[in-house]
Image (cartoon, rainbow, N blue to C red):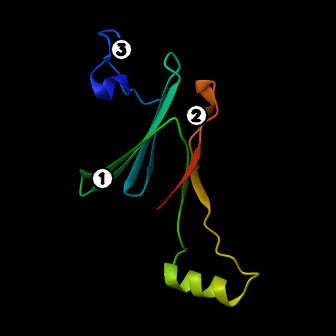
Amino acid sequence: MRLLTGTATPKEDRFEFVPDKITSLGPIVLAEGCDQGRSICWVHACTVTHGVITQVREYLNTSLTVTRLGSVGKNLSDIASTSSSSPSSQPHWPSVWESSLSSQVGKSVPGLVLAI
């Protein structure tokens, strides 16, 4: 917060994002890192289109799970109509990636699901 409001001291005014892990899931590139000294973990989720970063999402002190929506050959409306017609056939959106560094900051962090 002090960095964003301009009240940080010179020692506090630098934060370098050095990734510990980088993973690619199709057009989405996930970079994950941790600064244990500041008790901060982070995940950047970048969408890359034709070699250009077109979207960046940043998550700080959050345990992130990436889930793929739908399945091959089905669109979301097909899955939704299938699940509403039969209560026993719930849509299955498998986890394809989970952040692993959030446990290293020494405190509980909220969880979030990123659907791709």
Q: What residue type is labelled 3?
A: Glu
Mark 3 near mark 2, Cβ–Cβ under 8 Å?
A: no
Q: Which mark is residue 84?
A: none
* Residue 109 in view (yes/no): yes
Which corner quadrant of the image does residue 54 belong to?
Answer: bottom left
Q: Residue 55 carries which label?
A: 1
| The one of 99 and 38 positioned closer to us in this rendering | 38
Q: Which of marks 3 and 2 is nearer the N terminus?
A: 3
For image coordinates 50% across by 78% down, the residue present is: 76
The image shows residue 87 at horizontal and vertical percentages of 74, 83
Can you say whether 35 is above or below 12 in the image? below
Disc 3 to disc 2, C-alpha distance: 21 Å
The image shows residue 33 at horizontal and vertical percentages of 47, 30
The kind of secondary structure element at disc 2 is helix
Q: What residue type is labelled 2?
A: Ser
Which residue position is annotated with label 3?
12
| The one of 49 and 34 positioned closer to us in this rendering | 34
